């Protein structure tokens, strides 16, 4: 079963890699497609584009790791009793930081965590994941579509999932010291066992596919908008919020570091270029005030 589950994640990983590759036409962009192994067990594939005409940077990661000692970031799950016979964790994570400030940054993650018995079979398990959107210049229609499409997908599994997952996303992707959310939300879930493992793996695959479809729709609507240095400067400062959340609060980052994960893959989610300014000008403050009206809003549909 573990091989079958890995195949589902690998297929989603390959699909997103292919589509992101098609977005980046620059022959000067740095492209890396690294397969790696982990000394404790397992490995993965990290695909990165940097410094292109479309992407400042993006990362599409697949990992399937195993071990005996649980990272602290996994211990909050009440289902997990004793991992004495080992665990298997697999998933994909995606981050996109486009060059054009009118195209939002985006994030998607789906993962499955399994506790194994003495024969190496799955004894216990849970799933998690979701996706969210971090804009810099707001477009109301984009966020309504983003949420509506997520709801339509999840309604196929349970009519209550979207409302719960959307609320989870708003609560998780908060930056407490800024009193802001990271973006306009989406869906997020953890410790998930409400479906059987077969239907859960199908839902994870559908979530990855819907993320890509919804994000490409936004890209196609916004990619031709011309931007100025002022727009770019605003984007770079606001990307600082993204870095602050990932380094200070993100459980996925903590899990990767605590599990002795591949540092380059874990930190590939950070924006390549980011700025912190001590004193902002009036134009920046005006743009930020307008953006926060959309970011600190519930987009439940």
Image (cartoon, rainbow, N blue to C red):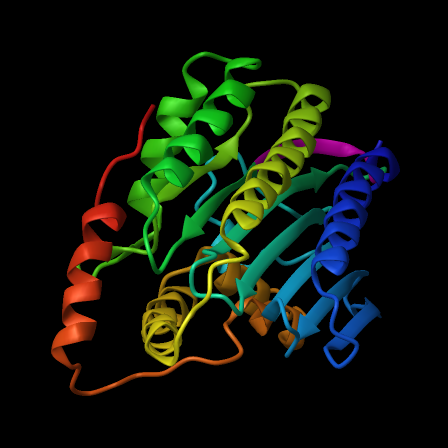
Magenta-drawn segment: 120-127
Residue 213, relative to residue 197: is it above or below?
below
Residue 36, relative to residue 153: is it above or below?
below
Residue 37 lies in the magenta stretch = no
Residue drawn at x 57%, y 59% as measured from the top left: 95
Q: Looking at this view, is 30 or 121 the one in front?
A: 30
Q: Looking at this view, is 187 or 289 the one in front?
A: 289
Q: Residue 259 at x, y = what percent? A: 61, 64
Q: Residue 127 at x, y = what percent? A: 59, 36
Residue 125 lies in the magenta stretch = yes
Position of 15 with respect to 77 (left or right) is right
Spot the residue most to the left.
Answer: 282
Residue drawn at x 21%, y 64% as measured from the top left: 287
Q: Looking at this view, is 154 or 66 the one in front?
A: 154
Position of 77 with respect to 5 (left or right) is left
Q: Looking at this view, is 234 or 73 the one in front?
A: 234
Q: Residue 250 at x, y = what percent? A: 42, 59
Among the 4 quarters of the image, the one containing residue 45: bottom right
Among the 4 quarters of the image, the one containing residue 187: top left
For the question of whether residue 7 can be seen, the reply is yes
Residue 105, relative to residue 184: is it above or below?
below
Residue drawn at x 77%, y 74% as measured from the top left: 31
Q: Residue 121 at x, y = what percent? A: 81, 34
For the question of whether residue 178 can be seen, the reply is no
Position of 223 with respect to 122 (left or right) is left
Main secondary structure of the magenta stretch: strand
Image quadrant containing the C terminus = top left
Residue 15, relative to residue 127: is it above or below?
below
Image quadrant containing the N terminus = top right
Spot the residue most to the bottom.
Answer: 278
Residue drawn at x 12%, y 76% as measured from the top left: 282
């Amino acid at each position: 079963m573990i091989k079958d589950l890995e195949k589902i994640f690998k297929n989603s990983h390959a699909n997103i890699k292919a589509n992101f590759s098609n977005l980046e036409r620059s022959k000067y962009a740095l492209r890396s497609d690294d397969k790696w192994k982990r000394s404790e067990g397992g490995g993965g594939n990290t695909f990165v584009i940097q410094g292109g005409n479309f992407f400042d940077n993006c990362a599409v990661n697949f990992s399937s790791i195993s071990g005996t000692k649980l990272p602290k970031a996994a211990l909050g799950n009440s289902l997990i009793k004793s991992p004495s016979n080992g665990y298997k964790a697999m998933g994909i994570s995606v981050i996109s930081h486009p060059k054009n400030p009118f195209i939002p940054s985006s994030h998607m993650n789906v993962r499955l965590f399994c506790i194994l018995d003495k024969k190496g079979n799955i004894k216990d398990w849970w799933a998690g994941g979701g996706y969210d959107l971090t804009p810099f210049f707001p477009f109301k229609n984009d966020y309504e579509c983003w949420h509506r499409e997520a709801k339509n997908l999840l309604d196929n599994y349970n009519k209550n999932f979207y409302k719960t997952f959307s609320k989870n996303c708003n609560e998780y992707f908060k930056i407490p010291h800024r009193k802001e959310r990271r973006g306009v939300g989406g869906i997020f879930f953890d410790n998930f066992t409400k479906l059987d493992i077969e239907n859960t793996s199908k839902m994870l695959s559908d979530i990855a596919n819907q993320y890509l479809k919804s994000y490409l729709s936004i890209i196609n609507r916004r990619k031709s908008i011309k931007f100025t240095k002022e727009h770019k400067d605003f984007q770079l400062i606001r990307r600082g919020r993204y870095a602050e959340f990932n380094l200070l609060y993100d459980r996925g980052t903590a899990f990767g570091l605590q599990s002795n994960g591949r540092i380059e893959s874990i930190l590939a989610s950070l924006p390549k270029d980011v700025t912190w300014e001590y004193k902002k000008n009036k134009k920046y403050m005006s743009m930020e005030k307008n953006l926060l009206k959309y970011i600190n809003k519930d987009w439940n549909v």
